[in-house]
Amino acid sequence: MISSPGNRAVPTDAPPLGTMFSDWRERGFDAAACPVRNVLDRIGDKWTLLALVALAGQPHRFGELHRAIPDISKRMLTQTLRELERDGLIDREVFPTKPPSVRYSLLPLGRSVLPPLAGLIGWAEDSYAAIKTARERFDTAD
């Protein structure tokens, strides 16, 4: 294990990322067919990330999620939830009420992404001051 800026433990048993990238290139890296890129494009989307974090604690109805995620439009929330459902990360349960109510919850695959997300979120919190300082230094450089 190594420590990140906030002393969070980072596993060291995985191959170094630089080595992994070199291996991919040697095997004829195809960006369009890359599973890592495909998944990270989805998970890395800001609305996806916020929806997963909002659902981490408990299931929510659509209106609850809309209130929990600042600045998201209903259309974008609907699209994000459909994509997460399509990818098998969330479940959409419809209740036979009038009008019908819908509840969204994380499936096991969606829960499995929470620990890596928590690590990334922790790193972002720990590193924000240093990143902000670097940006300011860059923006004021001649």
Image (tube, helix red, strand yellow):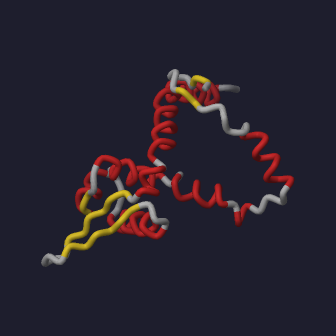
Q: Is residue 142 left or right of residue 4?
A: right
Q: Position of residue 134 (x, y in %)?
A: 60, 26
Extreme left residue here?
98
Quadrant (top left, top right, bottom left, bottom right) of the N terminus: top right
Q: Residue furthest right?
A: 26
Viewer-nearest residue: 70 or 37: 37
Residue 118's quadrant in the figure? Answer: top left
Count numbered badges in the picture: 0
Q: Nearer the viewer, residue 30 or 131?
A: 30
Please name the residue shown 39% across and 65% down the image.
81
The residue nearer to you, when weighing 99 against 107, is 107
Residue at figure coordinates x 79%, y 41% from the top left: 19
Residue 23 horizontal side relative to residue 11, left or right: right
- Within the image, what quadrant is residue 141 found in? top right
Quadrant that contains the C terminus? top right
> Residue drawn at (37%, 57%), measured in percent from left and top?
106
Measured from the top left, where is residue 53 in percent x and y?
Answer: 38, 48
x, y (%) of residue 57?
30, 47
Q: Can you give x and y, in whole percent of width and height, for residue 6 in the image? A: 50, 22
Q: Residue at x 36, y 65 (%)?
A: 91
Asked if 142 appears above or below 44 in the picture, the reply is above
